[in-house]
Image (cartoon, rainbow, N blue to C red):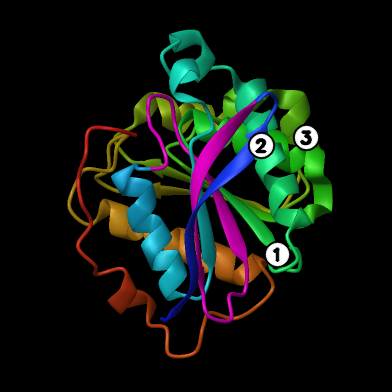
Amino acid sequence: MATALEKLVRIPADHAYIEGMLVLPENAQGLVLFAHGSGSSRHSPRNNDVAQVLRAAGIGTLLMDLLTPDEDLDYQTRFDIPLLSQRLLGATSWVKALRELQALPIGYFGASTGAAAALQAAAIRGNEISAVVSRGGRPDLAGAYVLHQVQCPVLLLVGGHDDVVIDLNRDAYEQLHCTREMVIIPGATHLFDEPGTLEEVARQATAWFARYLGQAPAAGWDCEEACRMRITSSSST
């Protein structure tokens, strides 16, 4: 799919700026904002691979650093879910203020601790957010009260060998009152390093966003072909 826009952006956040990579395919049908996990960044190979599949389906992506370089050096800040959520909310407001983006339905893709931030932000923005996908997420860190407030459809993707996180996601699933689904991906551990597991994450996420961002996938898009792309491996979340 041809790219209509690709640029590095600086988004105001409190008294600082966070950087992100915004990519829009031609005739984008929506935009997914990525919230990375602890110790990761917008350069996460896993998130970038999922983003590539989304763009092949005609969905724009914004991968960003939710923390400044100095903030990321603080271990406690990496787990500051309210701060991460506020940064994601700030990025959402920034998107909504841009004329060329404001009409696009918005989704959130959260990995690990980023999933909690995505759910908190979705609860606050209400029906302005069309869908959330969590990859190996910690939705429990969002808090039960927050989970009760989420209105948009939520997909929880968990590795079949990620035992503790499976239980945490099951508990969170019960707390969600919105349209939701939990999918356990066989053979996958927390980082989805195993062959074929990240492809399945990308396939499930793309189908979810295509369904709930309000339009069909882009013409000519083949899910199986798109998800057979070479998925890279990395030790970062």
Of circles 3 and 1, the one toward us is: 1
| Circle 2 SS class | strand
Q: Which label's residue is closer to the chain start, 3 or 1?
A: 1
| Residue at x 70% of width, y 67% of height | 104
| Residue at x 66% of width, y 66% of height | 212
- The residue singled out by tag 2 in the image is 12
How far apart in space, not on screen, are marks 2 and 1 (Cα)?
A: 21 Å
134 vs 232, nearest the viewer: 232
Q: Which residues are magenta?
A: 16-42
- What amino acid does circle 1 point to? Pro
Mark 3: few/some/many CA within 10 Å (<14, 14-19, 20+)? some
- What amino acid does circle 3 point to? His
- What amino acid does circle 2 point to? Pro
Residue 105: image tag? 1
Q: Look at the picture and state if 165 lies above or below 26.
A: above
Q: Position of residue 11 (x, y in %)?
A: 62, 41
Of circles 2 and 3, the one toward us is: 2
- The residue singled out by tag 3 in the image is 148
